[in-house]
Image (cartoon, grey):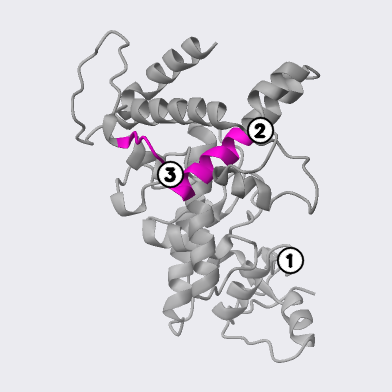
Amino acid sequence: MPHRCAFGCKNTNSGVVMHMFPNPKRFPEHFHAWVNLLGGKFERLSDHEIYLRKRICDIHFTDAHRNRYKRLNALAMPTLYLPETIAPSITNLIKTLEGIESLWKLLSRKYGIDAMLTKNFNQDPIENFFGNIRSYGVRNIAPNTVSFEGAFKALMINNYSEPHSSGANCEEDHNECLQSLDFFLKDKNIITLDIPDTNDTIHFNSEICFDQSNEINAGQTNYVCRWVLKRCLKFIIKGCQHCKQTLFENDISNDNNSYIYAKEYMNKKWLCYPNKEVESYFKEIQDMTTSFFFKCTQNRFEEKYCFVSGHAM
């Protein structure tokens, strides 16, 4: 027994091709779109079964919706001879699906692309940005101010080495407010002072060198120096008692080692305490390094770093 078209067409003869509704489990959006074209609603669970038994005749589809075997493709949508009372959203959805289908044919046939993520097709970089925020952490669809700030920081750091976010399709829009951190660090238009080459001569910056360091800076310096001495003790000095007596301090009378002493266990002396001589040497190395890189521009950083590494060997 032939089916009757759900739109009320009078094509009831056996020669008219009738098409079933899309599978609601595999294509739920298309299934609901077909139902909305009929003006239907889902009020009960049995409504799905009712529409699965309905058919739509072939005259409502264009040739673009059919494949070589005259069967409907996955994106097929009734567009011809439809009732006049159709919601604008349905009409726009039909146009969007037709545009996606045309774009897919171009990408697959001309450029050989075998996969396409439709969620990334958006011409507004602002919506791309907020889409990345909402998709961060899978369920961050309605972030509050705290989660939005955290997602923004995480995305900015993750995109540090990329010109744009990986999922964006606006690669040439040049929206500077949405550029990644890498763009601002490597922008060619950044104005920098020209510093002439000096044949690898280090100009010592006397402004940052002090004869007497304040207690906080000296304590921080000694704390880092303690870590360096610990590495030297493990890989270089090892069991040499003479080196230990020369580099380490026997008592804890030096106030600059108070940070280290605060990390020590009670009534123990297991940590390394640099003496005055090592503290002075390490402070000079720190001043030279700070002065060296203070004048180093971005485009010469790698060259100067290699120079320092070569002299440190």
Question: Quick check: 65 left or right of 46?
Answer: left
Q: Looking at numbered disc 3 in the image, what kind of residue is underneath it?
A: His
Magenta residues, as a range? 208-226
The label on residue 23 is 1
Which quadrant holds the C terminus? top right
- Report helix, strand or loop for mark 3: loop
Q: Looking at numbered disc 2 in the image, what kind of residue is underneath it?
A: Glu
Our reading of the magenta stretch's main secondary structure is helix
Which residue is label 3 attached to?
164
Is residue 84 positioned above or below 307 on the image? below
**Mark 1 or mark 3: which comes first in sequence?**
1
Looking at this view, is 200 or 154 the one in front?
200
Q: Residue furthest top?
A: 199
- Report helix, strand or loop for mark 1: loop
Tell whether position 219 is magenta.
yes
* CB under 8 Å between discs 2 and 3: no
Which residue is label 2 attached to?
249
Neighbor class of circle 1 (other Cα within 10 Å; few <14, some 14-19, many 20+) is: few
Nearer the observer: mark 2 or 1; the answer is 2
Looking at this view, is 9 or 69 the one in front?
69
Question: What residue lies at 74% left-to-right and 85% top-to-bottom?
Answer: 47
Residue 73 shows in this picture: yes
